[in-house]
C-alpha cells in the first residue's frame, strides 16, 4: 500500500482551522495528496482526537462539518490489540519523551502497514516512523 498516507491529528486539525499556523501548509498538502492520487488512511483514535480538538476549539458546527468531510475523504482503520501493545513498548523505550499513546499507536500502525505518516510532529521521527513530505 505505497500510495497511501496515514494521517496524524496535526495536519487534519490545521486544515480545518484557518487561524492555525500550519493551515496553509495543510491545505497545500491536501492538494498534493489528491494530485499524487494517494489514499488518506485514518486510525479511529486519531479521528476521535482530531474531532475533539475541532469541537473544543472551533465549535459544534465546525466539528459536524469537519467530521462529514473527513468521513467522505478517508479510509478509517482500527488498530489491532497488538498495535496498542507495541505502542506501549515503544513508549517505554522513550520514557524521556512526552509522546502520546495516540502518536505511538499511529507510528506502530504505519510501520505495520508500510505507509508513511502525514504529520508535523517530530515525535514520529523519534519513534522511527516513515514520515510523508
Image (cartoon, helix red, strand yellow):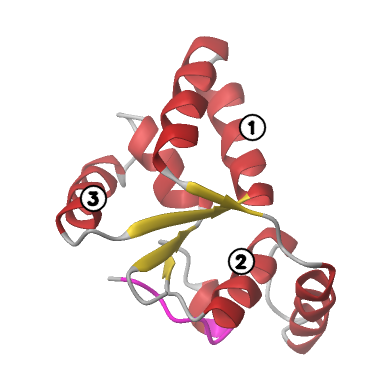
Closest to the camera, between mark 2 and mark 3, is 2
Q: Which mark is residue 76?
A: none
Tell whether 132 sits left or right of 77.
left
Q: Is residue 99 visible?
A: no
Dots 1, 3 in contact, CB < 8 A: no
Q: Which residue is mark 3?
A: 25
Q: Which residue is mark 1?
A: 52
Secondary structure type for disc 2: helix
- Residue drawn 22% across the image and 58% down it: 37
Image coordinates of residue 14 in percent, x first then y, are 38, 41
Q: Which residue is mark 2?
A: 106
Image coordinates of residue 39 in percent, x first then y, are 36, 57
Query: Quadrant location of residue 86?
Result: bottom right
Whether residue 56 is situated above or below residue 26 in the rendered picture: above
Which comes sooner in the sequence, label 2 or label 3?
A: 3
Q: CA distance from mark 2 to mark 3?
A: 21 Å
- The count of marks equals 3
Dots 1, 2 in contact, CB < 8 A: no
Where is the C terminus found, in terms of image quarters? bottom left
Whether residue 23 is situated above or below residue 43 in the rendered picture: above
- Residue drawn 63% across the image and 64% down it: 103
Q: Is residue 26 visible?
A: yes
Q: CA distance from mark 1 to mark 2?
A: 17 Å
Image coordinates of residue 97 in percent, x first then y, are 68, 76
Secondary structure type for disc 1: helix
Amino acid at each position: 500500500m505505497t500510495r497511501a498516507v496515514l494521517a496524524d491529528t496535526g495536519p487534519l486539525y490545521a486544515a480545518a482551522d484557518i487561524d492555525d499556523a500550519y493551515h496553509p501548509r495543510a491545505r497545500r498538502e491536501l492538494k498534493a495528496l489528491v494530485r499524487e492520487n494517494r489514499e488518506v488512511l485514518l486510525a479511529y483514535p486519531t479521528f476521535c482526537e482530531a474531532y475533539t480538538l475541532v469541537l473544543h476549539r472551533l465549535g459544534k458546527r465546525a466539528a459536524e462539518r469537519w467530521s462529514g468531510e473527513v468521513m467522505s475523504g478517508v479510509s478509517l482503520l482500527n488498530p489491532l490489540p497488538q498495535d496498542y501493545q507495541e505502542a506501549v513498548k515503544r513508549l517505554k523505550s522513550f520514557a524521556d519523551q512526552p509522546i502520546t499513546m495516540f502518536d505511538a499507536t499511529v507510528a506502530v500502525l504505519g510501520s505495520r502497514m508500510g505507509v508513511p505518516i502525514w504529520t508535523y510532529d517530530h515525535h514520529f521521527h523519534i519513534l522511527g516512523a516513515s514520515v510523508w513530505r
